[in-house]
Image: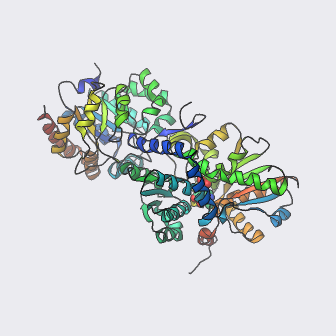
Amino acid sequence: MKTGRFGDYGGQFIPETLMKAVKELSEAYEYYRNNADFQKELEDLLKNYAGRPSLLYYAEKMTRDLGGAKIYLKREDLNHTGSHKINNVLGQILLAKRMGKKRVIAETGAGQHGVATATAAALMDMECKIFMGQEDMERQALNVFRMELLGATVQPVTSGTRTLKDAVNETMREWSTRMEDTLYVLGSVMGPHPYPTIVRDFQRIIGKEIKEQLMLAEGKLPDIVIACVGGGSNAIGAFHEFIEDTSVKLIGCEAAGLGVDTPKNAATIANGTVGIFHGMKSFFCQDHYGQIAPVYSISAGLDYPGIGPEHAYLYDTGRAKYVPVTDAEAVSAFEYLSRTEGIIPAIESAHAVAYARKLAPTMEKDQIIVINLSGRGDKDVAAIARYKGVALHE
Amino acid sequence: MSRITKAFENKKAFIAFITGGDPDIETTEKLIPAMAEAGADLIEIGIPFSDPVAEGSVIQQADERALKNGCTVDKLFDMVSAVRRKTDIPLLFMTYLNPVYVYGKEKFLCRCKQCGIDGMIVPDMPFEEKDELSGECEDYGVDLISMIAPTSRERIDRIAKEAKGFLYCVSSLGVTGVRSKITTDMGEMIRRVREVTNIPCAIGFGISTPEQAAHMAQLSDGVIVGSAIVKLIGEYGRESLKPVTEYIRRLKKAIKLCL
Ligand SMILES: Cc1ncc(COP(=O)(O)O)c(C=O)c1O
């Protein structure tokens, strides 16, 4: 098999100019993944800076209310910077540092990956530039200011649809002009090899902790693990530890926007076809001439027309299942979790909560669902108010 | 001898790039024979793509114009068939991999052969991934053009050895677009190629002035000019025949002096 493939998916479909950069990253990663010193430094950062392990919280009120399976929330929202993105970013920037880089660049959609990157860059003395679609900058104005507070430059992206995919294009373009001192810190399990593998490995800690924590609490494996899927990093992080445990069902929730049968959605598995884009062979929302489709979701973090290649493989082999969740369902779950448990989830994570709400009542009381709560919802409060037609004045 | 090989015979080749369907298919159909007539030795037709990652803003905007005006791969094939009746100039498609993959690789290459496309340049398919298309290209007699870049170094040998048609030597880091200066040591890059093969080498990315073209032609077997032409088309739209052919004549003259 070729390098960096998950079945036929994955690969390294990038311009020749960038091959040097991804090869250099591959080699560095191969070396440091087994380097005790590196791993120790990363563990230390995860524990003392990011606040790991994150809690596995038994959502008792939600469980009682839904009247079926027991529900646990993996609280990635409690990490420093408010989402799972920090797990990957600390790993990649530590790697950048060992590689002798002085500068990191990254794309961001919701701004969570941008904020995490800017944070770790501040901590590790790296110059930092974040590319963000103009439309996302408007949707997530607070996160733009957070990144700037952290010392990063935020570069608005005005090409194409002015959202996450265009931010990825622009970051790749920038990297191809300057790679000597710069590492592209990619935010999800996508892009050319080695990113899907590197990001997965840095996110696997989520599933490892779930397994240990649930073993302590319940003495058994979960029946279902549910996560939202944009590019797929929090989902693969939660799933990976359970792939061999075939009794555990793995469910990814895609953003269906206004509905999978409308043009306004970002449900890649439901509506996409196989293609080659952003460095990888995978599923993409596209037309029959292979033009990438403009996608839509209320959640900027899920507003991406592709999915990571390992998810494409898990889907093909039937090991994981992918379901669409609409804006309306996600907003309802956002409010539900806030009121029921006093936890405001990221609108991305609310997609996973929404599907769990449907599933739990159909299951037995001794069964267990773990929802990966990938992030907290503070960043979304203004957008949800807008959605509901509430005017906010700060 | 293939049409591509002939384009380099006893001369420095002038390779001109335009985005297909920019601003519309009719204009492209008129431009190609006129450019050939004005002295282009080979023409690259860019297939417009929604997300041209290797392109700078000039060609990005051309792709947007073409797509907005309804350009599709099928329309481009029909246009090329019509053009082929008027000119024998070698024609290449420059395309990202996805439009080919989604159209169906076999069907795409079959239509290339039928309408007289001589070669393909796929900027997001590096050496390691070229199996994705090389079999189909070979089956239909379409040269799959390889690229080397300033960062290629020890990769050059491997890439050059398996190159078909000509070798596309990228002059600068980054994306397409005109540059005031080319800082890469192109002479050195081409010397490395020459150690393993005699395939013609053409230099592209950043070239816009007659002086740059002449200088690059001295170091190689041909020059590729894209953004400078596409910029004229962006400016003059359907009326770009005259400015484009005038520009091509000027560059061709500068290159000719290098023989
Ligand atoms: C809280 C949160 N969850 C999920 C995602 C989606 O990314 P992924 O699918 O890679 O986990 C994002 C992306 O911005 C996010 O901020």
Q: In which quarter of the image is the N terminus of chain A?
A: top right
Near-viewer residue (A282 or A234): A234
Is residue B112 visible in this depiction of the protein? Answer: yes
Residue A108 spot, x, y in % from top left: 51, 59
Residue lying furthest bottom: A393
Residue A344 spot, x, y in % from top left: 69, 69
Residue A343 spot, x, y in % from top left: 71, 69
Residue at image coords 71%, 42%: A243
Is residue A82 visible in this depiction of the protein? Answer: no
Q: Is residue B132 left or right of residue A348?
A: left
Determine whether A210 is above or below A273 in the image. below
Residue at image coords 20%, 35%: B219
Quarter of the rendered structure image containing ligand 1: bottom right
Residue at image coords 54%, 59%: A113
Q: In this view, does B117 lie to the left or right of A168?
A: left
Near-viewer residue (B11 or B41): B11
